[in-house]
Amino acid sequence: MYAMLPRHMRFVTVLTALLACVPAAAEPDAESCLACHGSADSGAPVVDAKSFAASRHARSACVGCHSDIKEYPHPEKISKVDCATCHAGAKNSISSGVHAAVFAARKNGTSNACTSCHGSHATQSPAKLGLSLCAQCHKKQVSEYKGSVHGKASGHGDPDAAICLSCHGDGHDIRKVADPLSSVSPLRLPQTCAKCHSDPDLSRRHGLSTNDMYKAYMNSTHAKAAQNGEHAANCASCHGSHDIRPPNDPRSSIAAGRIVKTCGQCHGVEAKKFSASTHGQAAARGVRAAPTCVECHGEHDIRGSGTAGSRVARGARSEACVECHQSARVIGRGVPADRVDSFLTSFHGMAGKSGDAKVADCASCHGWHDVQPSTVTTSRTNPSNLTRTCGQCHPGAGSRWAGGTRIHQGLSDAGGGSDLAGWAALFYRITIPLTVIGMILHNLLDLWRKMRLPRARRHREDEVPLSVNERWQHALNAVSFLLLAYSGLALHFPDAWWAWPFSMVGGETARRYAHRSAAALFLVIGGRHLAYLATAPGRKRLAAMLPAMRDLSDPVKVFLYNAGLSNKKPVLAQFSYIEKFEYFALVWGSFVMTATGGLLLLHNMAMAYLPLWAIEVSRVVHYLEAVLACLAILIWHGYWVLFDPDVYPLNWAWLTGETYLHDDNDEEHHEEKGHR
């Protein structure tokens, strides 16, 4: 067949066969490349075969990056690798980040800018490279991180531990702190920290608080100020950034010994005052029970004193003081044990519990950051400064007070501020039990005797029915007394279930006006009664109510009869010692309550012109006299108008004017009337 071809075709065929025998240029592969680049003997750049095999690009061919190499062997000069061929997104991200300048500078050099972080042939992910990647440029920050709570957890292999990228975000898009888009900018840092610290499952795994710290912070005064464009504290301001440590670490910025300095970065004046205060000095000495900023203001949910829900708002800040000053770890270390109880039982304390947001609290008298014991001359509670301190609310108060006044004890129910108040308290603490026991025994004996009779009937002289005028006086007096007692006791027991109506309609303000209105009605009725006693019917009633000799013998006769020592039932006057005891107790109590109540109402004038013991005695007497009056009404009056078998189920005199309806067929009644 070859012989049959034309001569020129024979030449072409032979040439083609010869060319086919010449080997073609080979396409490079990893094995071919490593023939030269696997050792330094060739003089070519060395590539570590094992490192490359472990890299993220191990499955990629060399020409995947060195795309201008088309044959083997390749030209001596080749182009720089362009990572953007595959990683265009990373290139775009880094161009707007904090590393953009570094990237641009190295890109214009002789090396690939990407390899400065990722390496070249031994390319690894940032997570696998770890801290060594960032440490190339940020040695100080990495060193601080290693000593932090996050760094130590990461070093122990904790998968939850925050690393650089956890906070700073994608490595290619890391931005400056001042950049609003940065994940660590002041406005976005709380949200970044919340990724871990608002995760309840993560918190439980690591024994952290499960409270939503992010939510608490976002409701704080710091967060709101930051949102308004003001310079305000964020997470890093208090906790630090790379060197975050737990509170029990003395080097932590939130440790008890350093928290004041931390807060002082923004609140320098307050920190200086606190450091000089009794609390600050105790904290500086290492007293663990000493309060610092967070004990009073809180931690993440710090709010201004004028903000609802703030721990230092009026009406709430005393609770912060109480937490420590009634604690066993504080009492006995130079802190008196009765300060909390004496304050809570004072008018200030009880009014505060009732919801009065304007009444004086602990800080009103002792100050805030500059709290000092009363023995220090600059203290607000030093006797020489009381006129100015108390004068903030009570102009002129203290000008006539003697030095060494015990304010807490004096304004409390205990009455321990002065000897006179103490004696008054002792008098009532003896008188009240004896009076109550006497009334109970008297009434029980009367009840026991009458219940043994087959027919119990009232043995009294003929009654003069109560007039309509007298019944109105009684009704209005009863209304005013009940409202006085209810509103007054609601001050002392604001948390009692029966005091809730005042909480519903205005709290302490409603209680105060109710008490004063009832007192005004009581005084009007008292004045009306005095005017009535000047009339002819009133003088007749008064004459019947005046003490008589029989008021000494009648109680003896009643006792003998009720005790079964006499069979003759005493016949009592319409107004016997029973009614007279109650009437003159009311007169005496009205005088005492009006005098002490008026002095307490006009407290500013009293504190300006009277010694403190006058206020103290009035405070004690007004409360304890009210207690005695309420018990007398319940035990004495309650028995004779409700449970006395002679009038049971009710003495109707307050409605009909007569104690009970006389029965014309009542033989016993007629016999007694005939006997008289």
Image (spheres, rainbow, N blue to C red):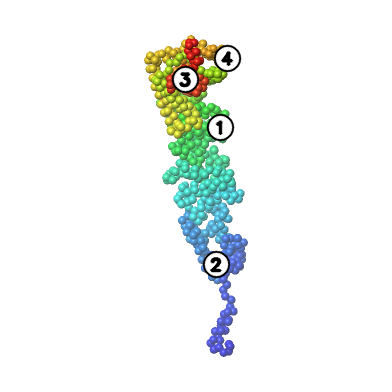
Q: Say which element carries label 1.
A: loop
Dot 3 amino acid type: Tyr
**Residue at image point 57% right, 72% down:** 26
Q: Which residue is mark 2?
A: 63
Q: Which residue is mark 4?
A: 564
Give the class, few, some or many, for how many residues have Cα within 10 Å of label 2's Cα (few <14, many ≥20).
Answer: some
**Residue at image point 40% right, 24% down:** 521
Q: Is residue 230 above or below residue 399?
A: below
Residue 423 at x, y = what percent?
51, 18
- Observer-side mark, 2 or 1, equals 1
- Observer-side mark, 3 or 4, equals 3
Dot 2 amino acid type: Val
Residue 288 at x, y = what percent?
56, 35
Find out whether the residues at labels 3 and 4 contact each other: C-beta distance under 8 Å. Answer: no
Residue 659 at x, y = what percent?
46, 19
**Reading the chain from its start, which is encountered first: label 3 or label 4?**
4
**Residue at image point 54% right, 31% down:** 326
Q: Which residue is mark 1?
A: 327
